[in-house]
């Protein structure tokens, strides 16, 4: 009878985690560090599908896009009336008018629950290996317990629930509120003192577990009562400080060059604690966080002439204004090394474009070796420069074979009046604000130099937990306990550490409060998927910003997808829709 029941609901396994114990976990190994033979192959075959599924969870059109577009950080209009409408899912998420049928929410649910199901199966298989005497499976078992907790935290953050499941032959138990917190806490504490810390950032380790515990306690007030005013308990803040102290006193250090955190070789960056390792050999990696917001007319790597951006998410004018408010008359590009890094160096004699346009600029270029060209990083504004193609689709070069770098022509929305790509501050859901060039752009991640195609694939690890976030968590916990001096010291340590370009090193602050700390979290962590969670915790999520006026507190959580509700209908009461949907 039990097996019949589980076969009946197997088509909705991604939603209910109701699996047969014999489910096959054999898949391609997604990273060279997970290969092996004999007993090692059992371990690789168990954990690789879990880590591999993180790439799907953190796709631009899955959880990453959900976090960014729901916040005051990113906006994605219907570009030119031709691109990125996708059933209106991005517009609805940004306006907090989503419904249970929104596919951005639905896809995020699917991949998080699929990854969770793989973690459950991996834990089950590795536990059996340990019981059978395979000692090398012990630490990977701890990793899978931690991964299960991490994925459940994503579910708790998005939908206010977690899936308690320890065996593939049992139906998940849905937990909310304090019960959900207690379950995740128990899972993490069970491995905290035993999981190894001698692995690279692409694998769960002791310090990542400590960071997850700090995140859990920092957000506990929201998780306990997602629709009320958060009650930040002193004992929770003490635990945040305890765990962040352990990490800050550990082996990590802040990166002097901020953008090295997001470069090709960031797997060895000493600030990164946990990341999505993209140094695999099967070309399953992705560069979506890099190319998604970039102009579709910009060729970021001339070595790969067919690569380009997609003109998707732009910086909201509201988020940009936080930088302006912080630095006043000083351009934030000059005041803060995190805002901008100039890599495309335009010769002085070419900077003035008065009288220059795409019809007469044939000789208005400079030359550079293809492998030396690098686009600017940070937040891109106004006219951008890059390679150009001839009528046959070939990159234009000079007599020495070097690539010609021109102002980039706006071929996507210029119409008959051909002009340059000029990223404007204005971006919204009007016709003008939805043009392909509208909006400043995020350019945080490097387009990979070592991957075989810098857009389809990437060797740049996606950063999920790093020391900068840990300093911010400790500062917030101190501030909520009334230790303003301690919080200010942490923020100033973080700001002044970004000193590889001294002229742009952020100056220390003279004072700190919750609004300034919230602002600083945006400066440090933009385009890393944290903004929505931080807005909710700081009481900013019901504010108005560009094209968003909804103030319903129920929108702090997303709706449970309708297809999950329908799939669970055979189990009465198993899934209950979140209020407000």
Image: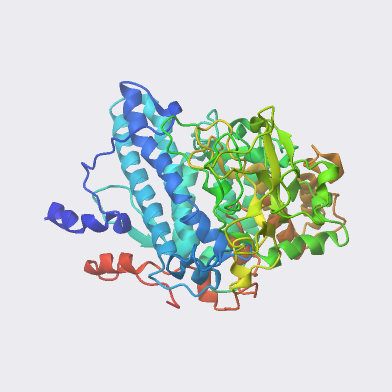
Q: Residue at x 77, y 42 (%)?
A: 498
Left/right placement of residue 297 relative to residue 318 reads left
101 vs 147, nearest the viewer: 101
Q: Quadrant of the N terminus?
A: bottom left
Is residue 471 something one can see in this rendering? no
**Does 236 appear above or below 35?**
below
Left/right placement of residue 284 relative to residue 67 reads left
Q: Residue at x 30, y 30 (%)?
A: 129
**Splitting the image into 4 quarters, where does residue 578 fall?**
bottom left
**Splitting the image into 4 quarters, where does residue 38 fall?**
top left
**Does 103 appear above or below 458?**
below
Q: Quadrant of the C terminus?
A: bottom left
Residue 382 x/y as whole percent: 73, 57
- Residue pushed farthest top? 37
Is residue 368 something one can see in this rendering? yes
Residue 523 x/y as whole percent: 72, 54
Residue 238 x/y as whole percent: 65, 53
Residue 84 x/y as whole percent: 49, 62
């Amino acid at each position: 009878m039990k097996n019949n029941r589980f076969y009946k609901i197997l088509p909705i396994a991604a939603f209910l985690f109701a699996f047969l114990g014999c489910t096959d976990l054999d898949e391609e190994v997604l990273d060279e560090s997970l290969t092996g033979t004999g007993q090692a192959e059992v371990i690789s075959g168990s954990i690789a599908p879990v880590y591999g599924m993180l790439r799907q969870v953190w796709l631009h059109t899955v959880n990453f896009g959900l976090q960014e577009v729901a916040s005051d950080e990113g906006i994605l209009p219907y570009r030119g009336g031709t691109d990125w409408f996708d059933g209106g899912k991005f517009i609805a998420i940004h306006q907090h008018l989503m419904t249970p049928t929104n596919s951005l929410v639905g896809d995020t649910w699917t991949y998080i629950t699929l990854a969770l199901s793989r973690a459950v199966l991996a834990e089950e298989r590795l536990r059996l290996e340990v019981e059978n005497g395979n000692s090398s499976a012990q630490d990977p078992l701890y990793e899978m317990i931690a991964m299960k907790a991490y994925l459940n935290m994503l579910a708790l953050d998005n939908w206010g629930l977690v899936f308690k499941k320890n065996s593939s032959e049992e139906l998940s138990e849905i937990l909310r509120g304090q019960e959900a917190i207690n379950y995740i806490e128990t899972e993490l504490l069970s491995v905290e003192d035993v999981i190894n810390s001698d692995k690279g950032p692409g694998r769960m380790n002791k310090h990542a577990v400590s960071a997850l515990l700090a995140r859990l306690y920092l957000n506990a007030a929201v998780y306990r009562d997602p629709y009320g005013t958060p009650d930040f308990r002193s004992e929770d803040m003490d635990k945040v400080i305890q765990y962040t102290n352990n990490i800050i006193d550990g082996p990590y250090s802040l990166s002097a060059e901020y953008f090295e955190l997001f470069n090709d070789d960031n797997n060895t960056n000493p600030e990164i604690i946990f990341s999505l390792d993209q140094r695999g050999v099967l070309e399953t990696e992705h560069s979506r966080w890099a190319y998604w917001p970039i102009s579709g007319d910009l060729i970021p790597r001339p070595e790969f002439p067919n690569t380009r951006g997609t003109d998707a998410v732009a910086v909201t004018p509201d988020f940009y204004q936080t930088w302006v408010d912080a630095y006043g008359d000083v351009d934030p590009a000059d005041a803060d090394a995190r805002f901008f890094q100039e890599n495309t160096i335009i010769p002085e004699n070419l900077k003035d474009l008065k009288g220059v346009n795409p019809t007469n600029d044939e000789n208005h270029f400079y030359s550079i070796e293809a492998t030396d060209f690098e686009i600017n990083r940070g937040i891109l504004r106004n006219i951008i420069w890059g390679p150009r193609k001839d009528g046959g689709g070939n990159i234009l070069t000079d007599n020495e074979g070097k690539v010609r770098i021109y102002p980039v022509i706006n071929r996507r929305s210029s119409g008959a009046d051909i002009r340059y790509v000029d990223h404007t501050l204005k971006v919204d859901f009007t016709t003008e604000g939805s043009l392909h060039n509208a909006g400043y752009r995020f350019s945080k991640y490097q387009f990979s130099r070592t991957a075989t195609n810098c857009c389809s694939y990437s060797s740049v690890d996606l950063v999920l937990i790093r020391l900068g976030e840990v300093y911010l968590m400790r500062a917030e916990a101190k501030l909520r306990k009334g230790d303003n001096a301690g919080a200010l010291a942490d923020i100033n340590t973080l700001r002044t550490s970004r000193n590889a370009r001294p002229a742009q090193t952020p100056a220390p602050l003279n004072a700190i409060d919750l609004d300034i700390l919230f602002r600083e979290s945006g400066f440090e962590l933009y385009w890393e998927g944290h903004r929505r969670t931080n807005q909710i915790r700081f009481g900013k999520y019901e504010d108005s910003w560009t094209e968003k006026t909804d103030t319903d507190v129920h929108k702090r959580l997303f709706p449970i997808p309708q297809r999950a509700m329908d799939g669970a209908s055979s189990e009465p009461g198993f899934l209950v829709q979140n209020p407000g949907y």
